[in-house]
Image (cartoon, rainbow, N blue to C red):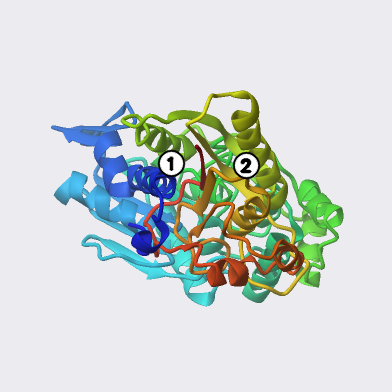
Amino acid sequence: MIRNRDELATTRARELALSCLEAGIEAARPDRVVAEQVAVEGDALSIAGTRYDLSAYDELVLLGGGKAADAVARALEGVLDDRLDRGLVVTSDPVETDAVEVVEGSHPVPDERAREGTRAILDRARDHDERTLLLVSITGGGSALLPLPAGDVRLRDLQAITEALVESGAAIEEINAVRKHLSLIKGGGLARAAAPATVVGLVFSDVVGNDFATIASGPTAPDETTYGDALSVLDRYDVDAPEPVVEHLRAGVAGDYDETPSDGLSHVDNHVLASAWTALSAAEDAVADTEYEPVVLSSRIRGEATEAALSQVAIAEECRATGRPIEPPAVLLSGGETTVTVLGNGEGGPNLEFALRAGIELPEGVVCASVDTDGSDGATDAAGALVDSATVEDPAAARRALVENDALSVLDDAGALIETGPTGTNVNDLRVLVVE
């Protein structure tokens, strides 16, 4: 899975770190997850332990969006066979499917193709009745890949506000509070349009805490945020928003537009099929047959990437100095989603900045690997990076690169980038520190 593994695995500790990453990503792949969580026996469809009587429905349909939506669709086709009547998903790097139509869109900034695909999804959702079982595949990246502007908001306004919010350092929950109030499909919009069909969300979570309302901006989930909350996010981070965006949010506050539904979605079931814990548990198992002791620090790491890196390096240092919280040799694992406040013009992403900041501070005998499980960190082609105490030869230059948000160039020159290509899944970031 890691294309340049041979170049990176120059020590046993580095090899173990890469094995943990591969095990975590592999465990979250849709084909494995769907095979474990979805089954058909006679007329009974079982999804994450909940049973649905297929004889109660005239048709079984799949809709959805996100980076892994196409892979989920293909996996479901394998399980459901000819019971799946049709489907439509929007994704960024399509794989081949049979019964399900796949529309390719852009991520992280939405494009025209994704908008038209999303419009078709909403139209199809409205066509169904109570005799339809509607499966909705929801995966990370769905916020960008399911764009359908509301009111007078234009696609270029969505593009501008998305880019501005991502670079502002706002948390994903805050970003999505804005997105939901600029969209016809997010914030429960898809579920509301599909009523009275039975809607079942099949969710691959890339959100800390697995909040259904935040994952892909919650197309099948009730939303507790308001137009006022969305405006507050713009103010809090001093976001330069297009005028149609501000006008739409203000009109919503004034009552000119309906709020996103906070209840009334009793026809909806949402199931988390995979999350950060899916990857972390598999990474933990990858250490089981070694002399290293694994410990999961948290599945909920968030905040600025560079600050999170310093915290985890400090834990590794404590392990070596005092044997707490665990005696070396040990493997420290964590998941979650850190952010980057963009102030420079370089290239990088949260995992690259995490790795570079860690690399500046790492003591000898500690290896750090950090990746985005979807295979692309930020807007780069690298999944993340693997570093140790010898990676950063010029700490001052590395610090300047972080100020310019240019971690990619330094790590590339050091031969530290991890290359996977699109992995077909997305369950947040995965970090490994091997402490000798």
Mark 2 residue element? loop
Q: Is residue 8 above or below residue 293?
A: below
Residue 98 in sight here? yes
Amino acid type, label 2: Pro
Say which quarter of the image contains residue 2.
bottom left
Q: Position of residue 93 (x, y in %)?
A: 39, 67
Q: Residue at x 61, y 61 (%)?
A: 349
Say which quarter of the image contains residue 110.
bottom right
Residue 261: image tag: 2
Classed neighbour count for the residue bearing mark 1: other residues with Cα under 10 Å, few (<14), some (14–19), many (≥20): some
Q: Position of residue 379 (x, y in %)?
A: 57, 68
Q: Position of residue 315 (x, y in %)?
A: 64, 34
| Closer to the camera in the image, 365 or 103 | 365
| Closer to the camera in the image, 62 or 205 | 205
Amino acid type, label 1: Pro
Q: Which residue is mark 1?
A: 196
Q: Quadrant of the N terminus?
A: bottom left
Residue 219 in sight here? no
Q: Position of residue 104 (x, y in %)?
A: 41, 70
Q: Is residue 89 above or below residue 279?
A: below
Q: Nearer the viewer, mark 1 or mark 2?
A: 2
Q: Given contact means CB atoms under 8 Å apart, are the residues at marks 1 and 2 in contact? A: no
Classed neighbour count for the residue bearing mark 2: other residues with Cα under 10 Å, few (<14), some (14–19), many (≥20): some
Mark positioned earlier in the residue sequence (1 or 2): 1
Q: Is residue 271 left or right of residue 108?
A: left
Q: Is residue 353 left or right of residue 9?
A: right
Mark 1 residue element? loop
Q: Residue at x 42, y 31 (%)?
A: 292
| Closer to the camera in the image, 146 or 123 | 146
| Closer to the camera in the image, 207 or 51 | 207
